[in-house]
Image (spheres, helix red, strand yellow):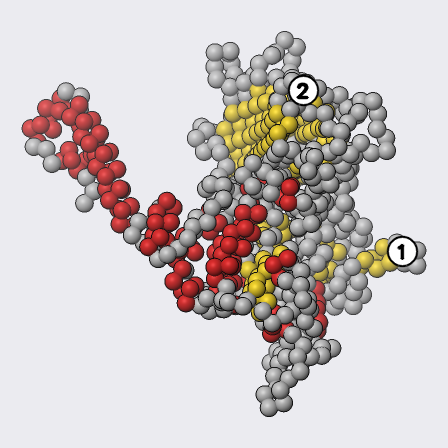
Amino acid sequence: MSLDADRLYELLPAIHRIRDGEQGGPLRALLAAFAEEFAALEDNIEQLYDDQFIETCADWVAPYIGDLVGYRPLHGLGGAAGPGLAPAVASPRAEVANTIRLRRRKGTALMLEQLAGDVTGWPAHAVEFFEQLATTQYMKHPRLHAPATADLRRTRALFEQGGPFNALAHTAEMRRPETGAGRYNIPNIGIFLWRLRAFRLGSVPLTPDPTDASGRRFRLNPLGADLQLFRRARTEDDITHLAEPINLPAPLSVRLMALAVRSAQAASPPAPDARLDDDYGEGESLVFLRPGNAGGPPTPVPLAAVRVCDLRDRLDAGGNPIGWNHEDALPAGTIGFDPERGRVLLGDVADGPLLASFHLGAASAIGGGEYERSPEGADLPAQRAIRDGASLQPMLDQMSGGGRLLIGDSLRYEGTPAPRFEVDAPSDDASPGIALVVAARNGARPLIEATGEIALAIGRRGRLVLDGLVISGAVLRLAAPAAGDDAPCELVLRDCTLVPGISLLPDGSAASPGTPSLIVEHPFASITLERCITGPLQIVRGAEVALVDCILDAVDASNVAFDGDGAGGPGGMLTLRECTVVGKLHTRRLELASNSLLVAALGPSATETWRAPVIAERRQQGCVRFSYLPAGAITPRRFRCMPDAGHLDAAPHFSSLRYGAPGYGQLRQVTSKAIREGADDGGEMGVLHGLFQPQRENNLRIRLDEYLRFGLRAGFFHAN
């Protein structure tokens, strides 16, 4: 039984308790101090018992338990798990737990797949390439499942050829798999890894197509742009199960999803090459919902009412779009959708309105999203909540005296005129500043959509925090203070997206490339951005800006990403930590740039103001370390930056630099190792530094050598 303060006090004789009460309770206070020590002792004893088991032990105990079973620890993971680093990567717990059974299965595809997942934290699929070799078969033992020629009627097999689930025979190739090139040969094993994650966006209304007069065309993306949908991977329950497509967060395909949906809808048994993992339904990758009556919960649209369609644009003779495919072929009462473009076509206007829950792909949890977060401000005195797309401004007007406003869903919050975030000044100079937090609740991703500037008004020593929001269609502006007011103020953006280019066009491109997302005219302001995606910043001299784990995107490397006045003048003091910057940068003082990528170019219209793509006016102060800088950059002293004398051709190559694309900000494998492993801890430079991808790959190479049987060769391949 726990010895808390009340129980210890009750054990005393009544006469002592009476006298203690008469004297103000000093004995009770003493016993409360004893109770705290007893509680710490009890917790320690309970933890000692938990430390006997790998499932419940502390992280520091896991290597010691591993030593008992002969587990060899891996190094170089850079410390504890961060927001983007899976716990399986930061701690060897899963690998230690599986050590015995992995060794019993040494050299098998099941074991190698489990090992790759435990070591890297990425979903994995193992392939024995000798099973996919075209060979002359022994006539006494024919293998009907492995023909040397392709069956042109097997749509799925033809579509998947050459990928992780290839089922067609290939001739032998002599390159080794360790190089990432050789595949089909007798000793070769391949480990396919999925680096992109599927993030959910739940119960959001469909966005009408602005060019549609019929009222039938919609997009799933709340920003109104095309969007590649991803699969919500189903967890494998047992090590004896080899991963299938349904277990991996891969992009959804029109052809393959149509096969599965048609098979599930058919009354007869499914075709041999179709599978029932249709990805549609509650808790699956995608589901359409009809709003509930009288505020009730939404109801799912049944599978029988949906069709998978190729809804790409139809073009006229001049190549101009005139609509979408299948507009005349889709019957009323059905809903057509295109998972590769995120488009939805109603059979009839009466088939709406609809909501949708779906998954999109990204490399890491940055910007606004429904991933796990902990919004600050729970200790502030005033707490308010808003949901269902209600108007923000009336609630913001009530909160100017401080507190926290929680937005409770992922709906669109429109502001016409744009909402104003205002923090009052304290009544006198002796009072502390006022703090206001406007945040999305954990698991929500609200979209604030406006058509004009969003004014930020922060009083003396005030603090405004925006957390978990996506802001589109508007520029945030922090105006200059009143004359004679030199008191500081603070602006914090955390897990937010200020859409680069202000808003997106239907094809996903930026509507206003190079237009600033945040303008700060307050010279005594301190601005902090953490895990944000934002367009250019225009920061007045005197202000201080710190970016941590952010993408600062001017859409094009020749556009301005950071300056002071919109005309190329120097901006305020800047600090960059693990950031990717696309665009020119001109700052009064670059205090620090660490583990960052600065991708900038002067372009054809270079002026005297932009005599270099990156300019820091005060070069005697500040430091740039373990970062990539464009040619001609004018910066403070550098330490181990790229390119250097030994890597003159080192440059970052990205999977995509278009906001909304699945590989946004992700470095491709062709990028020089001097950049992919050039950070201070051996990780990659840029915003994805916290994923520790090079360390994951190196650890997998070490483990493959340990667990491969003699004569086999293994390599890994990134599926995305």
The residue furthest top is 484
In the image, 538 versus 159, the foreground residue is 159
x then y, percent, for residue 404? 51, 32
Seen in the picture, residue 586 relative to 326 is either above or below; the reply is above
Q: Which residue matches tag 1?
A: 319
Numbered disc 1: secondary structure: loop
**Viewer-nearest of labels 1 and 2?**
2
x then y, percent, for residue 16? 9, 27
Amino acid carrying mark 2 in the image? Arg
Q: Residue shown at 35%/57% (left/top)?
A: 69
Q: Is residue 104 among the parts visible in the rendering?
A: yes
Q: Is residue 287 among the parts visible in the rendering?
A: no
The residue furthest right is 318
Numbered disc 2: secondary structure: loop
Disc 1 to disc 2, C-alpha distance: 52 Å
Q: Quadrant of residue 485?
A: top right
Seen in the picture, residue 431 relative to 124 is either above or below; the reply is above
Q: Which residue matches tag 2?
A: 619
